[in-house]
């Protein structure tokens, strides 16, 4: 391999292209090794590259080609402009979930203004949703729940790194709040929604290296939504927001579930940046008829 960053990148891009892997991976790895942002890396393209960096790049690309996600190689994923620690114990945050966070912030302002309210993130994983919302809106008292103790270790570390005020609870869906008799104004969740029948279609990086607990939602992908929606009446205050990220093709049925559970509430589906029905909301009056 040649001695400049540009030539190393060109070789790495060919290596990835031959294996039908995402070519930006090479750039992400080099930015991580050199601790530079993208614009700085582009300015350095004709600079010499150390042999040890080239060796590390080759090794990590082989590991990535074997199925290890690049985020596990570098130890983090960017979310809402912040670096969140990720490992095999948590789902790697996706860009679509940033849109859920943005929408929740807008809806909170519309329904509650500057009023101080409590929000719970159900199935917090890395803490990307709960930590981000806590940092973006100081009027939110944020709780985060996960059934995985290993995931909570990661989430707590992320919260600590950003000095985010999030209270973490261990338990299954909303059970910790139900046990405490605690009520909240906002429930947000990105639960596991991949049907077990689709497991064989997943990329190896996802199927073999991300926690199945955070990926699969039963035979039809809707098991966790059914259970969560059954629990909601026990924890929601009279005026509230429910915000759920959903899988492709699931939005209408989940919207119907929410409408049946809360006939007085308004419901809506929002599209993600790719035009897919990715978010479902119930908001307003949450009392039953």
Image (spheres, helix red, strand yellow):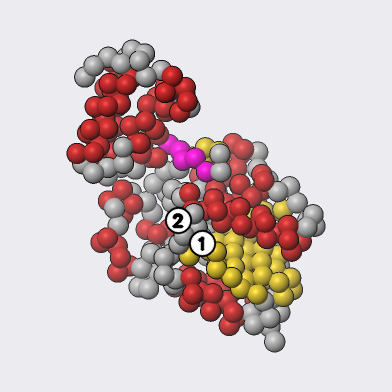
Secondary structure type for disc 2: loop
Magenta region: 75-79
Of the numbered discs in the image, which one, if any, rests on residue 271? Answer: 1
- Residue at the image point whose x is 39% and y is 46% from the top: 88
- Quarter of the figure that contains the C terminus: bottom right
Please state the horizontal and vertical placement of residue 144, each as a whole percent of the image: 60, 55
| Residue 193 rendering spot, x and y as whole percentages | 42, 65
- Image disc number at residue 181: none
Q: CA distance from mark 2 to mark 1?
A: 8 Å
The residue carrying pointer 1 sits among few (fewer than 14), some (14 to 19) or many (20 or more) residues within 10 Å by Cα, namely some
Q: Under tag 1, what secondary structure? A: strand
Left or right, 167 with respect to 127, comes to: right
| Spot occupied by residue 85 in the image (x, y as percentages of width and height) | 49, 40
Is residue 121 magenta-colored?
no
User: What residue sits right under mark 2 in the picture?
Assistant: 274
**Residue at (55% x, 64% y) in the render:** 270
Q: Are marks 2 and 1 in contact (CB under 8 Å)?
A: yes
């Amino acid at each position: 391999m040649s001695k400049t960053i540009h030539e190393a990148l060109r070789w790495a891009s060919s290596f990835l292209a031959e294996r039908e892997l995402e070519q930006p991976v090479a750039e992400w790895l080099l930015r991580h090794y050199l601790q530079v942002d993208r614009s700085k890396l582009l300015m350095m393209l004709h600079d010499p590259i150390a042999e040890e960096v080239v060796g590390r790049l080759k090794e990590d690309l082989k590991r990535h080609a074997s199925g290890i996600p690049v985020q596990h190689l570098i130890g983090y994923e960017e979310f809402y402009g912040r670096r969140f620690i990720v490992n095999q114990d948590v789902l790697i945050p996706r860009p679509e979930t940033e849109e859920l966070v943005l929408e929740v912030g807008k809806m909170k302002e519309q329904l509650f203004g500057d009023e101080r309210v409590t929000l719970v993130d159900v199935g917090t994983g890395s803490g990307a949703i709960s930590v981000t919302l806590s940092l973006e809106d100081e009027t939110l008292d944020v709780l985060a729940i996960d059934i995985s103790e290993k995931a909570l270790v990661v989430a707590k570390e992320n919260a600590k790194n950003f000095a985010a005020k999030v209270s973490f609870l261990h338990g299954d869906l909303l059970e910790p709040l139900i046990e405490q008799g605690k009520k909240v104004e906002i429930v947000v969740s990105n639960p596991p929604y991949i049907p077990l029948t689709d497991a064989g279609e997943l990329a190896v990086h996802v199927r073999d290296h991300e926690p199945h607990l955070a990926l699969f939602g039963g035979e039809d992908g809707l098991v966790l939504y059914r259970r969560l929606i059954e629990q909601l009446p026990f924890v929601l205050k009279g005026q509230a927001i429910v915000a759920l990220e959903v899988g492709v093709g699931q939005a209408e049925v989940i919207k119907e579930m929410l409408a049946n559970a809360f006939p007085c509430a308004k419901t809506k589906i929002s599209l993600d940046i790719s035009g897919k029905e990715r978010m479902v909301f119930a908001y307003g009056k949450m009392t039953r008829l």
